[in-house]
């Protein structure tokens, strides 16, 4: 199985290192005529589907490109607001690619902090004294592993760490060390 991301969180719950090892795949691309039969809205500097699932397009998917040109947040490549662009009947037919957008830096910080809180709660709620907290969180689609350093916290990150991490991810991916569904 592929390792998608690595997050390093300190004891206080702050994100101190993050590396993405994947590129979000496009879920669906479709050509539309006017009027658009999906409801789109601005959400966290992106344009997302808020209503109208169909043809592999799901609620929460973000607009990734229009007519083959990648969008930048909530704007087209030439700086126009996507929602305004799609209101204009003269822009149709239009081909829109939808999928899961990359997380923003703020979203990554928020998720790391939230996971740290769940980890701490798990440690405290455990009926076993000295529980190490959450070791793995499993869903039907992925497994989230939590590893701790021996000292509990690492203060310095350098280029060598980054290079070694990327090498380890490549080796693990090729060897399949995590097994199916990991």
Image: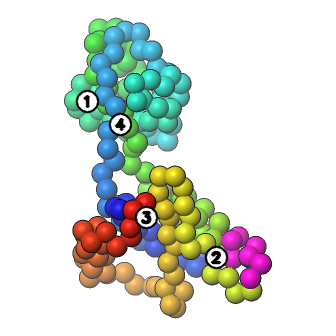
Real-space Cα distance between discs 2 and 4?
A: 35 Å
For disc 4, the marked residue is 27
Task: Look at 43% across and 51% down and name the residue there.
Answer: 104
Please tell me whether mark 4 sits on a helix, a strand or a loop.
Answer: strand
For disc 2, the marked residue is 133
Mark 3 vs mark 2: give the one in front: 3
Q: Whole-percent x and y of residue 129?
A: 74, 86
Q: Which residues are magenta?
A: 121-128
Tag 4 or tag 2, which sits nearer the N-term? Answer: 4
Q: Whole-percent x and y of residue 131?
A: 68, 82
Mark 2 is surrounded, within 10 Å at the Cα level, by few (under 14), some (14 to 19) or many (20 or more) other residues, namely: some
Mark 3 vs mark 1: give the one in front: 3
- Side of 118 relative to 45 (left or right): right
Q: Are marks 4 and 1 in contact (CB under 8 Å)?
A: no
Q: Are marks 3 and 4 in contact (CB under 8 Å)?
A: no
Res 78 label: 1
For disc 3, the marked residue is 182
Residue 36 visible to the viewer: yes
Task: Look at 45% across and 40% down and name the residue there.
Answer: 45
């Amino acid at each position: 199985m592929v390792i998608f991301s690595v997050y390093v969180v300190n004891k206080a719950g702050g994100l101190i290192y993050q590396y993405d090892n994947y590129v979000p795949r496009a879920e669906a691309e479709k050509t539309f005529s006017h009027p658009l039969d999906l409801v789109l809205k601005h959400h966290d500097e992106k344009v997302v589907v808020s209503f109208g699932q169909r043809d592999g397009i799901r609620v929460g998917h973000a607009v990734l490109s229009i007519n083959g040109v990648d969008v930048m947040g909530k704007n087209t490549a030439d700086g126009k607001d996507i929602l305004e662009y799609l209101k204009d009947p003269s822009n149709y037919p239009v081909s829109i690619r939808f999928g899961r957008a990359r997380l923003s830096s703020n979203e990554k910080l928020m998720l790391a902090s939230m996971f740290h809180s769940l980890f701490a709660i798990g440690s405290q709620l455990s009926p076993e004294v000295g529980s190490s907290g959450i070791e793995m969180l499993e869903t039907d689609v992925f497994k989230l592993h939590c590893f701790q350093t021996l000292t509990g916290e690492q203060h310095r990150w350098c280029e060598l760490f980054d290079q070694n991490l990327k090498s380890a991810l490549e080796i693990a991916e090729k060897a399949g060390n995590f097994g199916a569904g990991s």
